[in-house]
Image: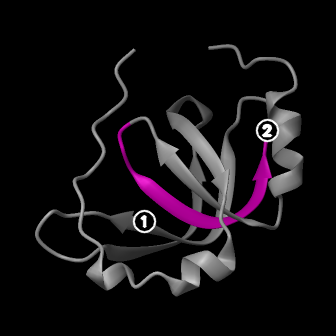
Amino acid sequence: SSVPQGMASELENYVDQIVNVITNDGRNIVGVLKGYDQCINIILEDCHERVFSPDAGVEQVVLGLYIIRGDNVSVIGEVDEDEDIAIDYSQVKGEMLKPVVH
């Protein structure tokens, strides 16, 4: 699949920042963006997956250094660290995201 021109260069602003990545299969992964390429393959450091549940608080699964293939990236967004720290994820409940259908 082709990536629109300039999309990869937009990620430059996020390097060494905490980002939240939503994958096409509905996973929610948070970590420090360390690198990427023109196919939006990305490398995250110190990352964890937030697993949502309607019955219990968010489970934070430590992943460490992690690579996500560009064709599995749905959304990448910058995380406001102050806002993020203020959230008690153990009290947050929610449905898991459904996979992206093309």
* Residue drawn at (65%, 65%) of the image: 79
Horizontal side of residue 72 vs 1, given as left or right? left
In terms of secondary structure, where does tag 2 sit?
Answer: loop
Is residue 2 shown in magenta? no
Mark closer to the observer (2, 1)? 1
The amino acid type found where label 1 is placed reads Glu
Q: Residue at x 34, y 20 (%)?
A: 101
- Relative horizontal placement of residue 44, taking residue 21 as reference (left or right): right
> From the image, which quarter does the C terminus lie in?
top left
Q: Using the image, determine if residue 9 lies above or below residue 31.
A: above
Secondary structure predominantly adopted by residues drawn in magenta: strand
Query: Which percent across, then down, holds residue 95?
Result: 22, 53
**Where does label 2 land, which residue?**
37
Q: Position of residue 85 (x, y in %)?
A: 56, 85
Q: Is residue 84 left or right of residue 2?
A: left
**Residue 76 at what x, y percent from top left?**
63, 46
The reply to whether the C-beta atoms of the residues labelled 2 and 1 are less than 8 Å apart is no
Q: Residues within 10 Å of mark 1 (few under 14, many from 20)?
A: many
Mark 2 and mark 1 lie on one chain; the one further toward the N terminus is: 2
- Is 34 magenta? The answer is yes
Q: Is residue 58 above or below residue 12?
A: below
Q: State whether residue 27 is above or below residue 6.
A: below
The N terminus sits in image quarter: top right
Mark 2 and mark 1: Cα distance apart in space: 22 Å
Q: Amino acid at mark 2?
A: Asp
Checking the image for residue 49, the label placed there is 1
The magenta span reads: 25-36
Residue depicted at x 10% and y 69% = 55
